[in-house]
C-alpha cells in the first residue's frame, strides 16, 4: 500500500501516508518514520499547490472544474500534519526534532492573470496541529481574500472563544484584487462564514464586525473589475448580509449597518484583464450542441465520438485551457451516454486522452476533475477498474487502487 501512495502526486500521496499512520497498527517509531517520509514528500523540491484557474468560463464548465476543490489538499497542509504526527510519535533519544514547515506566501494576482493562489485545506491542517500553534502560525500570512475566505471557513466551524475576533477585524482592512475577491466569494466560505462569526460575536463585537465587513465588501465591489467579472451579480450576497444584520439588530437591540443594492454593481473594468473571448469557445459550443443532439444508436455514437476525439481548441489559447476544453468535451459526451451500451467506450477513449496528454503533469486541476468522473464510472465494477488502471496513467492507477482499498483496516504490509 505504501508503494501506491508513493506513486501519487505529492498533494495526494502525503496526506494518505498520514492517514495510514492513524489507521495502521504500528509502533510509534514506525509512525514517526512514516510521517517523516510524508513530510519530505510534501516539502520536496518543486512541490506546491497548483494555482487555481479563476478567469470566467461558462458556468457549468467552471463548476465541473471546481468540483471537489474545497477538500483538495495543499502539500504544505500535509507537511503540517506530518510534522504533528512526527512530533507526537518520535523517540527523542534517537529521532531528531523536525523543523516546522515554513509559512506559505500568497501571491497578489492581477486581472492580467488567469489564476489565483488557493491555500485549500492549509488552515484546517494548522488547526489540527493544535489551536495554540494555529493562532501563532496564521497571523501575518493572511494577505488576500482567498486566504481570508479559507481561514474564515475554519474559524466559523470552531468555538467562539477560538476565533480571535480582534485579528479578524485587522484582516478586514486588507484589499485584494478583483480576481482574488471574486474567486473567494464564489468558492470559499468568506461571505457566509463572516456573517456567522459576526452574528455569534455578541452585541459590541458583532456590531463592529458588521461595520468592518460592510466596508470590506463595499471597497471590493467598487474596485475595477476584471473582464468577465463585470457581469457578476452580488445582489444575493447583499441580501444575505442585510438579512443577517436585521436578525442581529433585533437580537441585540442596537442599530446594525445595512448595504445598498447599488454598491454591488460594477463601476469600471480593467482593460488589461486576461479573459476568454466568445470566439475562443465557439467550436466547443457547437460541439456541445451536436453532443446534445446525438442519438443512442451505433451510427450517431461513432460519429460524435470521432468528433470529440479529433476536437482541438484554438491553438492561440494556453495549453491548460486547450486541455480544459478537450476534457470537458469528453465530460459532456460521458453525460450524454451515461447508462447506455456506449458509456464504457466513451470512458475508455477519455482515459486514453488523459494518458496521452499527460494531463496529471500538465494540468493537475483538470486531472482532478476528470479523475472524479473516472471514479464514479468505475464504482464497484472490477472490469472497469482494470481498464482504468491499465490505461497508461500511473497516478490514476495508484489512486484507484487506494480508493478500492479505502484504507479500511489495511496494514502497511498489504
Image (tube, rainbow, N blue to C red):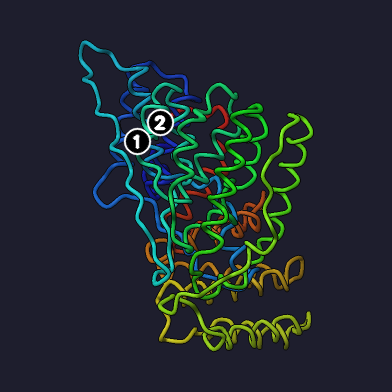
Instruction: Check the image and report above or below for 201 versus 277.
Output: above
- Residue at the far front: name it: 255
Secondary structure of the residue carrying tag 1 is: helix
Task: Bin the neighbour count of mark 1 within 10 Å (Cα to Cα): few under 14, some 14-19, many 20 and up.
Answer: many
> Which residue: 65% across, 37% down?
196
Q: Where does the image place residue 293, in percent across and percent down from the top left?
A: 76, 84
Residue 96, quarter of the rendered image: top left
Q: Which mark is residue 246?
A: none
Instruction: Check the image and report above or below for 213 versus 407.
Output: below
Residue toward you, 206 or 231: 206
Q: Quadrant of the N terminus?
A: top left
Q: Which mark is residue 81?
A: 2
Q: Where does the image place residue 68, in percent across and percent down from the top left?
A: 58, 51
Instruction: Check the image and report above or below for 264 versus 103.
Output: below
Residue under pointer 1: 38
Q: Left of 90 or right of it: where is 323? A: right
Q: Where does the image place residue 24, in percent across and percent down from the top left?
A: 47, 24
Asked if the residue at tag 1 contacts the one at tag 2, i.e. Cβ–Cβ closer than 8 Å, the answer is yes
| Foreground tag (2 vs 1) | 2
Instruction: Check the image and report above or below for 30 versus 408.
Output: above
Amino acid at each position: 500500500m505504501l508503494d501506491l501512495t508513493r506513486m501519487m502526486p505529492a498533494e495526494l500521496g502525503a496526506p494518505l501516508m498520514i492517514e495510514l499512520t492513524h489507521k495502521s497498527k504500528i509502533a510509534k517509531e514506525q509512525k514517526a518514520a512514516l510521517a517523516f517520509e510524508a513530510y519530505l514528500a510534501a516539502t520536496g523540491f518543486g512541490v506546491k499547490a497548483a494555482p487555481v484557474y479563476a478567469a470566467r468560463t461558462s458556468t457549468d464548465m467552471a463548476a465541473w472544474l471546481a468540483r471537489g476543490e474545497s477538500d483538495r489538499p495543499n502539500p504544505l497542509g500535509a507537511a503540517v500534519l506530518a510534522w504533528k504526527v512526527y512530533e507526537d510519535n518520535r523517540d527523542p533519544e534517537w529521532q531528531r526534532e523536525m523543523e516546522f514547515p515554513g509559512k506559505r506566501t500568497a501571491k497578489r494576482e492581477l486581472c492580467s492573470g488567469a489564476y489565483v493562489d488557493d491555500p485549500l485545506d492549509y488552515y484546517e491542517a494548522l488547526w489540527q496541529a493544535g489551536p495554540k500553534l494555529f493562532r501563532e502560525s496564521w497571523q501575518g500570512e493572511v494577505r488576500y481574500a482567498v486566504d481570508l475566505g479559507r481561514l474564515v471557513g475554519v474559524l466559523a466551524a470552531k468555538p467562539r472563544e477560538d476565533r480571535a475576533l480582534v485579528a479578524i477585524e485587522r484582516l478586514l482592512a486588507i484589499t485584494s484584487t478583483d480576481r482574488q475577491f471574486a474567486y473567494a466569494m464564489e468558492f470559499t466560505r468568506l461571505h457566509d462564514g463572516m456573517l456567522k462569526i459576526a452574528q455569534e460575536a455578541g452585541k459590541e463585537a458583532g456590531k463592529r464586525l458588521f461595520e468592518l465587513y460592510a466596508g470590506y465588501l463595499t471597497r471590493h465591489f467598487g474596485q475595477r473589475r476584471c473582464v468577465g467579472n463585470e457581469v457578476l451579480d452580488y445582489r444575493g450576497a447583499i441580501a444575505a448580509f442585510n438579512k443577517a444584520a436585521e436578525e442581529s439588530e433585533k437580537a441585540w437591540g442596537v442599530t446594525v449597518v445595512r448595504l445598498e443594492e447599488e454598491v454591488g454593481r460594477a463601476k469600471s473594468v480593467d482593460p488589461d484583464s486576461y479573459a476568454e473571448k466568445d470566439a475562443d469557445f465557439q467550436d466547443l459550443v457547437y460541439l456541445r450542441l451536436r453532443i446534445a443532439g446525438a442519438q443512442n444508436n451505433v451510427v450517431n455514437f461513432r460519429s460524435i465520438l470521432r468528433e470529440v476525439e479529433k476536437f482541438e481548441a484554438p491553438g492561440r489559447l494556453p495549453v491548460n485551457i486547450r486541455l480544459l476544453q478537450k476534457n470537458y468535451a469528453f465530460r459532456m459526451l460521458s453525460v450524454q451516454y451515461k447508462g447506455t451500451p456506449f458509456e464504457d467506450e466513451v470512458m475508455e477513449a477519455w482515459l486514453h486522452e488523459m494518458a496521452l496528454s499527460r494531463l496529471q503533469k500538465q494540468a493537475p486541476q483538470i486531472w482532478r476533475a476528470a479523475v472524479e468522473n473516472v471514479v464514479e464510472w468505475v464504482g464497484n465494477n472490477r472490469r472497469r477498474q482494470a481498464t482504468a488502471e491499465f490505461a497508461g496513467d500511473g497516478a490514476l492507477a495508484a489512486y484507484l487502487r487506494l480508493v478500492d482499498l479505502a484504507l479500511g483496516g489495511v496494514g502497511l504490509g498489504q
